[in-house]
Image (tube, helix red, strand yellow):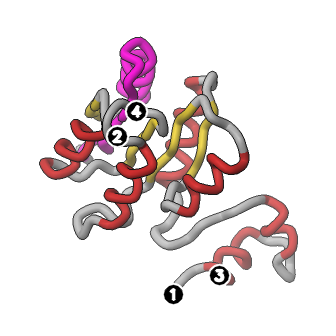
Amino acid sequence: MASQQVILIVEDEKDLAELVQYNLQKAGYETLAAADGEQALELLRQRTPDLVLLDLMLPGIPGTEVCRQIKASARSPRVPVIMVTARGEEVDRVVGFELGADDFVTKPFSVRELVLRIRAVLRQPVGVVVHSVDQIARSPSGKYEEYISLVSPE
């Protein structure tokens, strides 16, 4: 049997962290949890997860700095990061994406949608970013496969 994919949940709201952890475990993922940025970075030094769910507004080290360190680390530069935050302004999303976030989810959110977003991010081939359906439609044939060949680093 294949090993479970590991998701690190970095969330300081205990009830929300437990809700997300419970639902991800039910969906077949192994979970690790950190209540602040410092604890998250310590867990990342011990084990590299398959994906990080990262709250932006954390006590101590902010989520933006945690994301920057994840992407700068030799151990985890390709670990996908989904930022989860109450701050949904465009500037917050832009900063998150510039720091290397792979997706952005605004609170409150549907746990079901979050699980589906996690599955989608984990399905993406390394180095391929699908920005929008519009970009696929603008590829010469409008086909997903052609779009992937245009943006793939190979």
Question: What's the CA distance linking mark 3 and mark 1?
Answer: 8 Å
- Side of 3 where 138 appears, left or right: right
Q: Quadrant of residue 136?
A: bottom right
Q: Quadrant of residue 104?
A: top right
Q: Dot 2 lies on which element?
A: strand
Q: For residue 7, which numbered disc appears in the image?
A: 2
The residue depicted at 34 percent of the width and 40 percent of the height is 7
- Side of 43 where 64 appears, left or right: right
Q: Earlier in the sequence, mark 3 or mark 2?
A: 2
Q: Nearest the camera: 112 or 39?
A: 39
Question: What's the CA distance linking mark 4 and mark 1?
Answer: 37 Å
- Side of 154 where 90 appears, left or right: right
**Residue position marked by numbered label 1 in the rendering:** 154
Q: Earlier in the sequence, mark 4 or mark 2?
A: 2
Query: What's drawn in magenta, residue-wise?
Result: 3-28
Above or below, 76 against 9 in this view is below
**Residue position marked by numbered label 4 in the rendering:** 58
Magenta stretch encompasses residue 88:
no
- Three-letter amino acid code of the residue under disc 2: Ile
Q: Dot 4 lies on which element?
A: loop
Q: Earlier in the sequence, mark 4 or mark 1?
A: 4
Question: What's the CA distance linking mark 1 and mark 2?
Answer: 27 Å
The residue depicted at 33 percent of the width and 57 percent of the height is 70
Q: Dot 3 lies on which element?
A: helix
- Three-letter amino acid code of the residue under disc 1: Glu
- Side of 138 where 43 appears, left or right: left
**Could you tell me residue 153's position as x and y percent?**
53, 84
